[in-house]
Image: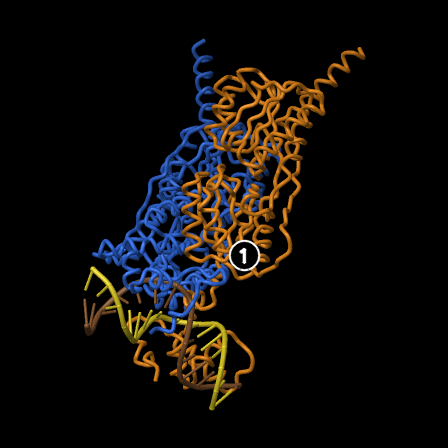
Chain colours: A blue, B orange, C yellow, D brown
Amino acid sequence: MSPRQNNRQKAGKAASIYDVARESGVSVFTVSAVVNNKSHVGKKLRERVEEAIRKLKYRPNLIARSLAKQRTHTIGMIVPDIANPFFPMVVRGAEDAAQKHGYNLLLCNSDDSLDKEEQAIEVLLSKRVDGILLTKAAEDFRPPLRQMIKEAGVPFVLVMRTYPKLTKDAVITDDYQGAYDAVCHLARAGRRRIGLISGPLKVSNAMARWQGFHDALKAKGLPFEKELMVEGDYRIESGFRAGHALLSHRPDGVYVANHLMTVGLLRAAEEMGLTCPDDFGLVSFDDYPWLGVFRPKLTTVELPKHQLGSEAAELLIARMSGSRQKAVVRKLQPELRIRESCGFALHVSKAQAEERSANN
Amino acid sequence: MSPRQNNRQKAGKAASIYDVARESGVSVFTVSAVVNNKSHVGKKLRERVEEAIRKLKYRPNLIARSLAKQRTHTIGMIVPDIANPFFPMVVRGAEDAAQKHGYNLLLCNSDDSLDKEEQAIEVLLSKRVDGILLTKAAEDFRPPLRQMIKEAGVPFVLVMRTYPKLTKDAVITDDYQGAYDAVCHLARAGRRRIGLISGPLKVSNAMARWQGFHDALKAKGLPFEKELMVEGDYRIESGFRAGHALLSHRPDGVYVANHLMTVGLLRAAEEMGLTCPDDFGLVSFDDYPWLGVFRPKLTTVELPKHQLGSEAAELLIARMSGSRQKAVVRKLQPELRIRESCGFALHVSKAQAEERSANN
DNA sequence: TTGTAGGCGTTATCAA
DNA sequence: TTGATAACGCCTACAA
């Protein structure tokens, strides 16, 4: 007789599989089989067990199950900052996909700090998540961490930012193309001295956006003036400072690598008495539903945020299930949403006006 | 000899406490004591154990610990939708507080649906979270769920929305006051026919905001016209529909109960060729950093989102630690941020103009 | 088909 | 101070 068979059920203690077994006069094996509706349990027994489950209000303890099965059905997700409006939709995408497959999300914020990121990874590994979705912070992992991750054998999928030293599995956006399109649009709208407020160049997507910017300039035969490029950190404050620095050189177009820095830029512009799109055309990254109702109506490069999260989660889940194919880099296409901040309408109407006056 | 003492360490399997014990020639008890730097372990032994830990790269398995200690150091958090810009900062606040106390956040979205909410609660309970932060969906729990929650003995703290049938512990904002202030400000700006786009009245804060609206109208001696009140669901689409319905009656002021519906309203206004603040004054809830740089510059009632989350988490953690004081309802104060959408400046300058013309 | 008993990795109780 | 050893609750060979 197992030592467990003694009386439980007293004191709020939740019923265990043993209690159910005793109540229904079967073995724990049978109960377990019923709970996981496994193979063929005799109809009679099954009913008796189910009856007992209801009676005792039995609820399987997933912690115990996790320990036994060595799988937690939990995914760790590390983002720089959930309060950055870019990430909520990504997280939502991941959660939707996770949920669909019976997984939950353990959410951590790194603030783009190596220390916090490392801490988060350690705790996630200790909590034995089945996999991790990571938007890598700017700097390199310290070697011991990388070693530990490797040994833990927990799959990672990178989100938004690549970091091949860890894994090649990643779901990102075509940032080069997005930036390229943005700058071309600015040029099309007649802007000639185009500036850039970039993300931290140690981050893969910031680098890609910078390259797209650069190549578009070249393709359009526009000059690259190095005072017209400022590196920020994707936060408002840095956009504000960058805006002051940049606008003091009076560019007639600006491409900003994310929304938060755009907010900072507009703050600076206002302080300097400059308005958009009259004094400078503007295209930025990340679109949001509310950008369509406020002026200046921002022309943006939208990234498929939800899809980014959901595809990353799907890929991770595939990896966790042991799919051993070679690394996948999924690159999603951005979409240029033309509104008014680039001054395209302005430019066009100006051109028309000139045309008209020429005709008269 | 315990059956566990046989060879492990092969196949990527992580080292367990047994491996460390064997390696350092002590008992698991001692290792455990060292890991949790408990009481007095002989200095020599401690060093030997630490050595072994380093050598084997031992990392405690928190799942096993959770099972043994019956505590997971994990908090479940259920929000309607993390993609609603209101919640990210609340979640961030909760995560910050949780993190500070050594807890993690398991995040779920309910979409304000009873089914999803119930599902989320069940899985969180099964995963044995130590407590749950809940922004209650609109409808009532089904009785069995409430029963189960009670029996689970897991503390809940409500966030943003009260629901006394579950618990009185809650961290909310003074929504009545916020709405009251908003409407008074509209009145002060000379608006007389003030409309309301409300949240779902089954949600506690929507009800409170509606009452604040109503009482402010009365206090200002303004009429309540029932065509000027429309109930939405806090989403953009409902704000859009409500906007069409409402604006067709040409109110000169509108108070909207959250930001997303404001976006919808502005969309509708644009379709109808109405502009804010010229055709109608506007005050809405929730403030965001970017609202200060776009026009119309929204006058809003800001709610301390981060604090909401962090205080809720703190309270929950206190409860989980068995603090048995009576229920706490913490009500945080909102803050009216006056910008331009209410048309106050407009009104004032108009008044000045009249004054001037009267003086001539 | 069903039962028995050992294992998952920790903590905790009781002796020694 | 340390060490055995029984929980914790579930899964799962291996037997029957």
The residue lying toward the viewer, choosing from B345 and B115, is: B115
The residue lying toward the viewer, choosing from A353 and A71, is: A71
Looking at the image, residue B285 lies above or below residue B60: above
User: How many labels were placed on the picture?
Assistant: 1
Residue A255 in sight from this viewpoint? yes
Q: Could you tell me which secondary element the residue under label 1 belongs to?
A: helix
Q: Residue furthest right?
A: B359
Q: Position of residue A189 (x, y in %)?
A: 43, 28
Amino acid carrying mark 1 in the image: Ala
Judge left or right: residue B234 versus residue A150.
right
Name the residue located 60 percent from the left edge and 53 percent from the top edge.
B315
Judge left or right: residue A314 versus residue B329.
left
Name the residue located 41 percent from the left edge and 81 percent from the top edge.
B21
Name the image quarter holding the N terminus of chain B: bottom left
Looking at the image, residue A168 lies above or below residue B185: below
**Protein chain holding label 1:** B
Q: Position of residue A260 (x, y in %)?
A: 51, 42
Judge left or right: residue A64 versus residue B166.
left
The residue lying toward the viewer, choosing from B329 and B346, is: B329
Name the image quarter holding the C terminus of chain B: top right
10 Å crowding of disc 1: few (<14), some (14-19), many (20+): many
Residue A202 in sight from this viewpoint? no
Looking at the image, residue B83 lies above or below residue A129: above
The residue under label 1 is B98
Looking at the image, residue B245 lies above or below residue A245: above
